[in-house]
Amino acid sequence: MYLEHYGLIEPPFSITPDPRFVFLSERHRDALAHLLFGITQGGGGGFVQLTGEVGTGKTTLCRLLLEQVPQLESTTPTRVALVLNPRVTPVELLESICEELHIELEGRRGSTKALVDALNVYLLDAYAQGLRVVLVIDEAQNLSVEALEQVRLLTNLETPTQKLLQIVLLAQPELRAMLAREDMRQLAQRITARFHLTPLNASETGEYLRHRYRVAGGTRFPFDASAVKRIHVHSGGVPRLINVIAERSLLAGFAHDVPMLDARWVDRASAEVLPARVRRTRRWLFAVPVAALLLASMGMAAWWWPRAPVQAKPATTPVVPTKPVVVTKPAVVSPVAKPDLAQLDAEAFAAALRDAPLKPGASGAVVEWISRRLHPAYLATSGAPAVFDAAMQDAVRRFQRDAGLSADGVVGPATLMALAAHEAPVRTAALESDTGAQ
């Protein structure tokens, strides 16, 4: 739909693990080297384990690995059994392996011994022909303990000098926790190569986006620097989430006829496509340093806050007046000027956090403070007292979008802390009156 708008041949950010679009960061290159090691050198017949968070590219690397197998025929003739759905019983797992290797299963289904015997015959014949046999199990964290034990027993198929089956496990980090159990130590000790795949950093995220866009036929990159930065922040560098956010941003740009996308378009796209849990996680990652800054500011305010003058104690030695005492009226003490609302006191701010979210139509010290934080970038000033009306709510939404928050116009704790960290203009005039906090 948007391909012609951007001059593309095909969608650049599909989540299908297409090896043509693979972007090999330094970590991905190291991971692929580990997998190739498991196929060629074999690691002495042990397991090769590749783990990584959801969406970091494990399956894509697996597809790329399988594309390399035909190129190894001249040096290392290889036969690969790929298991994509390991949530099966041990017997069903053995049947899947045999089916992948085209082993005849007539009369053997349902029998563990018959299946293992047939697999052993196949492996001995492959060894005699100089073939290497590799079993690749994707999503291996879904294997049951019984199925993992059956996989371990397959490594016992060997000759006096060599293991007959090399096993590669691709899994989420849960597999590492599973193998750390005491009853899994026999399998854990047979893992000869381990590698954990991490998300892309900010620089790699930009290179990833440009690489995929170029492979899809694009010539003019549609994301500016702020958009690339926001894509990395929202996705955490996870390639799958990068694809989802970038794809939705391109659709929005097409719908609104925008040739160059900035951070605001990315924020809107991520708010639509990312799960609420991911958005909350990203928001609190932003809010934690803001909260630390707020606490430090509150501490400084408490230290410098003006104290009430202490009355002097009466002298112990009576003083005899030499003149008649003239009784006068007490002097009228001028009220102390209220500090600038840009430096809202800690007690009022704590009350605002406790009473959040702010109610429509509210007024008072907190609303005045919010108004001045939003001026002049988001809200124009007026001589009238500040009220949390539709205009201020719209200004809050624009501020939330720029701060990476959910642009709902609701002034909750996260928005208040973000406003506290926002650079406010310096005021020179003292306030004439003091209104209570909302």
Image (tube, grey):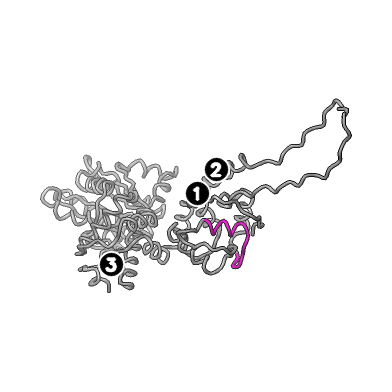
Range shown magenta: 359-372
Label 2 sits on what residue type?
Ala
Q: Quadrant of the C terminus?
A: bottom right
Mark positioned earlier in the residue sequence (3 or 1): 3
**Farthest-out residue, front:** 323
Measured Cα–Cα span from mark 3 to mark 2: 43 Å
- Percent position of residue 219, x then y: 20, 62
Label 3 sits on what residue type?
Pro
- Percent position of residue 338, x then y: 64, 50
User: In which quarter of the view is residue 246 placed?
Assistant: bottom left
| Dots 1, 2 in contact, CB < 8 A | no
- At 31% from the left edge and 45% from the top edge, which residue is drawn? 195
Q: Mark 1 points at which residue?
A: 290
- Is 365 inside the magenta-drawn segment? yes
Q: Residue 259 carries which label?
A: 3
User: Callout 3: few (<14), some (14-19), or many (20+) C-alpha neighbours within 10 Å?
Assistant: some
Q: In this view, does 48 lie above or below 356?
A: above
Horizontal side of 172 relative to 296 (left or right) equals left
Q: Mark 2 points at which residue?
A: 296
Label 1 sits on what residue type?
Val
User: Callout 2: few (<14), some (14-19), or many (20+) C-alpha neighbours within 10 Å?
Assistant: few
- Percent position of residue 74, x then y: 10, 50
Horizontal side of 163 relative to 351 (left or right) equals left
Q: In this view, does 263 lie above or below 27?
A: below
